[in-house]
Amino acid sequence: MTDLPTSTEKKLGLVIDLDTCVGCHACVISCKGWNTENYGAPLSDQRPYGEEPMGTFLNRVHSYEVKPEGGAAQTVHFPKSCLHCENAPCVTVCPTGASYKRKEDGIVLVNESSCIGCGLCAWACPYGARELDQAEGVMKKCTLCVDRIYNENLPEVDRVPACVRTCPAGARHFGDFADPESNVSKLTAERGGMDLMPELNTAPVNKYLPPRLKDSWDDESVLAPFLEPVAEETQGFMGWLDKQLSRLPGDVKQTEGAE
Amino acid sequence: MHPAASVIVFTTLSGAGFGMLAWLGIDSTPSTGWGAFGYYFVAFALAVGGLLSSTFHLGHPERAMKAFTQWRTSWLSREGVCAVLALTVMGLYAAGLIFLGEALSILGWIGAILSLGTVYTTSMIYAQLATIPRWNTPLTSLLYLTFAIAGGALLTGKVTIALVLLVAASFVQVIWWKKGDTAFADRGTNLGTATGLGDRGEVRSLAHPHTSPNYLMREFIYTVGRKHVQKLRVISLTLMAAVPVVLLALFGANHFIALIAVLSHIAGVATSRWLFFAEAEHTVGIYYGMR
Amino acid sequence: MTFQQPKIDTSPKVSDEIRKTTCYMCACRCGINVHMKDGKVAYIEGNRDHPVNQGVLCAKGSAGIMQVNAPSRLKAPMKRVGPRGSGEFEEISWEEALDMAVARLKPLRDNAPEKLAFFTGRDQSQSFTGFWAQNFGTPNFAAHGGFCSVNMAAGGIYTMGGAFWEFGQPDWDRAKLFMIFGVAEDHDSNPIKMGIGKIKGRGGKVIGVNPVRSGYNAVADEWVGITPGTDGLFILSLVHELMKAGKIDLEYLAQFTNAPGLIDPETGLLLRNADDKVMVVDSVTGDLVPFDQKGARPNLGATYKADGKTYTTVMAKMAEKYLDPQYAPENVAEKTGVSAKKIKTIAAELARVAFEESFTLDHAWTDFRGDKHDKMIGRPVAMHAMRGISAHSNGFQTCRALHVLQIVLGTVEVPGGFRFKPPYPKPIEQHPKPHGKVSKSAPLDGPHLGFTRGPEDLMLKEDGSPIRIDKAFTWENPMSSHGLMHMVISNAHAGDPYKIDTLFMYMANMSWNSSMNTRGVIEMLTDKDENGDYVIPYLIYSDAYSSEMVAYADLILPDTTYLERHDCISLLDRPICEADAAADAIRWPVIEPDRDVRGFQSTLIHLANRLGMQGFVNEDGSAKWKDYADYIVNHERKPGIGPLAGFRGKDGDKVGRGEVNPDQLDRYIENGGFFVEHIPEGADYYKPWNSAYQDWAVGMGIYDAPSPYLFQLYSEPMRKFQRAAEGHGDRQPPENLRERVKYVMDPLPFWYEPFEDTAVDLDEYPIHALTQRPMAMYHSWGTQNAWLRQLHGTNPLYLPTKLWEKYGFKEGDWAKVTSTHGTITVPVALQEALNDNTVWTWNAIGKRKGAWALDKDAPEAKQGFLLNHLIHELLPAKGDGLRVANSDPITGQAAWFDLRVKIEKADAPAGEQSQPAFPEIKSPVGQGPDHLEWKVGK
Ligand SMILES: Nc1nc2c(c(=O)[nH]1)N[C@H]1C(S)=C(S)[C@@H](COP(=O)(O)OP(=O)(O)OC[C@H]3O[C@@H](n4cnc5c(=O)[nH]c(N)nc54)[C@H](O)[C@@H]3O)O[C@H]1N2
Ligand SMILES: Nc1nc2c(c(=O)[nH]1)N[C@H]1C(S)=C(S)[C@@H](COP(=O)(O)OP(=O)(O)OC[C@H]3O[C@@H](n4cnc5c(=O)[nH]c(N)nc54)[C@H](O)[C@@H]3O)O[C@H]1N2
Ligand code: SF4
Ligand code: SF4
Ligand code: SF4
Ligand code: SF4
Ligand code: SF4
Ligand SMILES: [Mo]
């Protein structure tokens, strides 16, 4: 049904930490693997061994450079999948009702057996989160691994999206944004989680944690606490060593308790 | 946006077809019998042909019936419903004219409104998309409607009205282009807002996520022919309005001239529609450092 | 209308069965859960219980399905029928293939075993392949370490008895400051990512030292965009700052390193007693005592007078050397491209975190002197480095310098610092020396590879000529512990030091991405002598896929894929241990091959059995093992010690040492394909000096007896080589190398200019050119993978803003890049976060047309390219006309990253075909399908 539910019980989604994403594409391929084998049609590949290979993927990692005024440029790896928008334009445009947002958890899904492959939902998504499968002719998108997160055939720890489970850097977090105590709500609050293209009012559920401030040592205005020499140069090695040895032993400042 | 032939044909032909139907519906002195058949045949051929063509780009045309279900939210669904209603009502009206020689003018009026409604719903499929700022304006509906009405007038032989409407359509078209050219920038969506990194500095795409173009890039990032845009705009205006206006003004409405004028107009509209898609930049392009 | 939505099955069945084995999509060797449906591989995920990856998996690992179904898989043994390089083959039976190989190898073994050169590339079974080569009797065996990262391994082992790479790891749970030098990915792929994630998650700081800011350097909080080849200078400048400020851990240096060792002013060797123990002055008693005397407190500042000589300490020598103003930040800033202020800031931060954020763990432990400690002192500064510092001709000394930096901060094997993984730490004395004594029809006198302690250990014949075809362990590279695989083909072609008959190679794409001077290598492999015979007479090769190398072999012994065979990730080999645990693992056939292929290790056993090789056959000539699985279980290196440490003994309850357990493989499979034995608390840090650890290691079979040792800040083996070059002893370097040996074999690390910089005209070739590994690709095998090649199927040359603007490049442009050796024409792209004078590209994306079952117009074969065409295995000739190897002069490590180039804008070549382009090879396996809809359980 292309009506958006007026509210959802849960707001499941991802937090993606741009401060730790190393751009390894692990999430991209585990997503491809899981979703090829599971929910819906396989994610097909055209010309897989040929010129211009082109396959369907539900998650892609871009690479950007940010050039701060006067500072060194920074590289940011940027994974992107469906943000499960609260105000999902992809859902309301769908003429068949194939696209819908689940009222229990807010996951935006495509019911492939109703989809006519008109592509309009992909047109309506600002983020490029939907890809029309060229072999099956139906729209594919991130399912938030709806067939994992509730799957009773999986051990409880594994009931998380494939991309989250696999991310080696721990840059992807899954949880319920409706619960202010959830890991994702807390991370978003602590680290200033951002919306993508907020001006389009899609109200994305997924949040991005901005990279922490970088290259603070390049800032000329920061007065670095340089090290003080122990001895004047003139006193030579023995003077230096004397001073050194008088420091012995011990310089412990903190103690970590027994574990 | 990739200017797929199917959508260009669809919007061009069905626009003209429904425009024609609208004029036919409100005609206070409709022709009947074979004369009516001629007009309605052309109008239905255009409208239905356009609609059929639009199904060519569907992944699953056999499920097309499902597309009528979501009229409460979806402009595409509304278009389908509206088109079917318009065609049905106008079909009944036409049947009356052709077979009974009767004009049930109330049906004609309803049909005309539905026909224009169809053009409007079509326009809204595009105008609703915030992702494509160039389209995302009420002017898009105005553009589609004026084109449809002008084309309809031309096709139904309403020469004087057509002359005026073609000139009006040209104006709307020029304004639409002008507004469109700055629409993306005016929207304020850029790689900075798309990544949330804009407040740190200039953001630039370093590498794409994949080796060769994928569905998104093929569908949404179309840069071919950008160099020739101005030329194409002139060609489009010339064919769509100038040629028909000049021909009709100079030679009046003889059949041969009218045919040339109509063909020129349709070619002009098609060119305009090609530009409509080819020039449209989708926000997805931003993620690729392209537009 | 009310809101309606379809009902979906959120609990579908995931698979019929999970089979747990070990990934082989790279050398990290993560544990994987292979989900099976209808007996087929349906989905691969990480194994949560596995010590290496703890459930996570990289892109390559998840793409394993596409490797196992790759159309490029070889199908059967093949013999060459067209000329070498054409790709024309005929499939033959295994019987015929083995007969052909034996017909060639038997006479060699009987008459001149050295005429077989057996080199095994990225081998994960080196302890087995080495055993095979040793029993064959040829001295010519090594794996890929020489062109890979021997500087890193040897630099670490010679200095501290262990290395980074995969032999150690930062204390990810306790480090607060992490400094990473020259790493794009490394072998410890997933653990490094997990570790960085942990450190950053706690708000710790990461410093990335790398000319390129991508991957790990992208997430680094501080980026040091250093000029390639100058890390040694940068590191020693940090040492200078720290020493000058007294921010060094004197207690640590005194107790655990040879800093208090006394240097004989005449020989430059350390003073030793009759038991060969290093002598120190006890600061309490003032007596001269062996370093490990109970209760001794070694004095760092002592002098000792005897026989009219004054001995001073290593510490004194270090102070003299590193306090010198040549290492002052101001004096290294220009060369390194790092400002003096930044160097000072980093030094201050290292000192602050190491000393002011230090902490203690309440783990009691006893050191080797018998001193009891109730606490362990943490220094939460950890470091890691890889090929960015090691793949330079000054790499060995730079690696040593980095270890010196860690050691003066006291951050090795302490909480929060860098930790070894079993079987490390292991002092030089516990490593073998190289062996090369050949006898007909008999095994070699010992293992091929090892660690030389001085000139007496070099692999030289009576006449001073090299014993080995790769000239490892000669004066050109006296400490070449991993051999020099990159020199084998060119030496064999030149017949220098001698001619060989058969080159037998395993999983090394030598005619493509793993060689320098690719075109040259292709020519050497196809070159014929005056009789029309190939100069390198015979080539046997084992690959699993239709790589570029396959076309150059005379006989192909096709391997299985990693899910179709037994393998053994052994403690005798490269470990998969964690700092807290010893671990090993297996692979087992989770599916059966659908082709006529065999696991290569089993093939070696079949060959050895037919050749009647000692070690493989019993007295009566019968085979000891029928295949590799049999060997893994039943082979014993020493009584009770075999390839696998877990589930030993009749009942499978013994660990490390124990009799053969016939059910061992089943026990591994039940346990998830691996085995872990944790190090007890209190034995987990200070391992080289910790009695509890030493005892545990003996129990595990890692050592035969406790072997505590001192870190070698001052390297005596190096001093011995240097001393020889000064004219002492009867083994003398040749005159053309004498000065070089004297210079580079400095027993204290120093920095010298990379050789290429002194050999080429830097005004003409001012730019550094590098490669990096993409995280989602493994060398050449990645781009045959239908999923991975969609991520990185092309590799533009990235240029920094300065060069981009200087040459007026625009998006989509091409450049001609020239070195003293060759020219390539390739697509370019801009990267702003890049050292001003450096360009780089992804490694091994470029493909030869016709290889890997790819279309000839695949992007990899069109725009893709190799930087290798610009790199030569020899440096340009000097005044004397001699060309020395483009390698580290100490270890022989290939100096990939010394490359200097010039750049010009160029027109795109016809068809956007990067240059040079080689003729297409005929694919022995055809081409892959044009679409895929992979789903096993429909
Ligand atoms: N320019 C440049 N060149 C480099 C480097 C660089 O940094 N820059 N790095 C160098 C380094 S460190 C290395 S280690 C080398 C690596 O270079 P190679 O050792 O050549 O590595 P691979 O490309 O991994 O390929 C080895 C071969 O193993 C085959 N193979 C894969 N799986 C199996 C299997 O299961 N069984 C068998 N029998 N064969 C298999 C593959 O098909 C391939 O032909 O490259 C070196 N070359
Ligand atoms: N995904 C993946 N993983 C792999 C491999 C693979 O092919 N793919 N290969 C495996 C193999 S065989 C190896 S040897 C390891 C190698 O692992 P890495 O050492 O990470 O290998 P490289 O990609 O060669 O990275 C070298 C890095 O050093 C930088 N660098 C170059 N010169 C300098 C310098 O002078 N100073 C500094 N500070 N940095 C410099 C380069 O920019 C680059 O980032 O990776 C292993 N792991
Ligand atoms: S797996 Fe994690 S670190 Fe790797 S690209 Fe995805 S989000 Fe980034
Ligand atoms: S990200 Fe795109 S596809 Fe996903 S809910 Fe939002 S608009 Fe729809
Ligand atoms: S492609 Fe499918 S899901 Fe998308 S709008 Fe069309 S029918 Fe709906
Ligand atoms: S949640 Fe599942 S479907 Fe969505 S990106 Fe992650 S793996 Fe793919
Ligand atoms: S790092 Fe990736 S490819 Fe390497 S073993 Fe682990 S999962 Fe496999
Ligand atoms: Mo390597």
Image (spheres, rainbow, N blue to C red):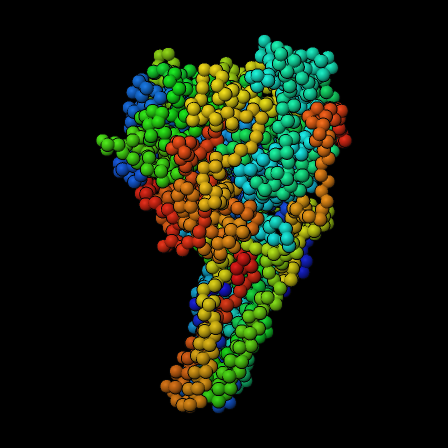
Front residue of B132/C150: it is C150
Mark count: 0
> In percent of the image, x 59 and y 23: which residue is there?
C714
Front residue of C205/B275: it is C205
Image x and y of residue C656, in percent: 55, 19
User: Is residue C136 positioned above or below A45 on the image?
Assistant: above
Image x and y of residue C47, in percent: 56, 35
Question: Which of the 4 quarters of the picture holds residue A201?
Answer: bottom right
Image x and y of residue C886, in percent: 44, 34
> In percent of the image, x 53 and y 46: which residue is there?
C837
Q: Is residue C638 left or right of residue C854?
A: right
Front residue of A36/C228: it is C228
Front residue of C253/C45: it is C253
The quarter of the picture where the N terminus of chain C appears is bottom right
Image x and y of residue B118, in percent: 53, 75
Residue C783 visible in image: no
> In percent of the image, x 48 and y 86: which residue is there?
B163
Q: Is residue C481 left or right of residue B128?
A: left
Q: Is residue A182 left or right of residue C49?
A: right
> In percent of the image, x 73 and y 30: which residue is there?
A231
Question: Which of the 4 quarters of the picture holds residue A230?
Answer: top right
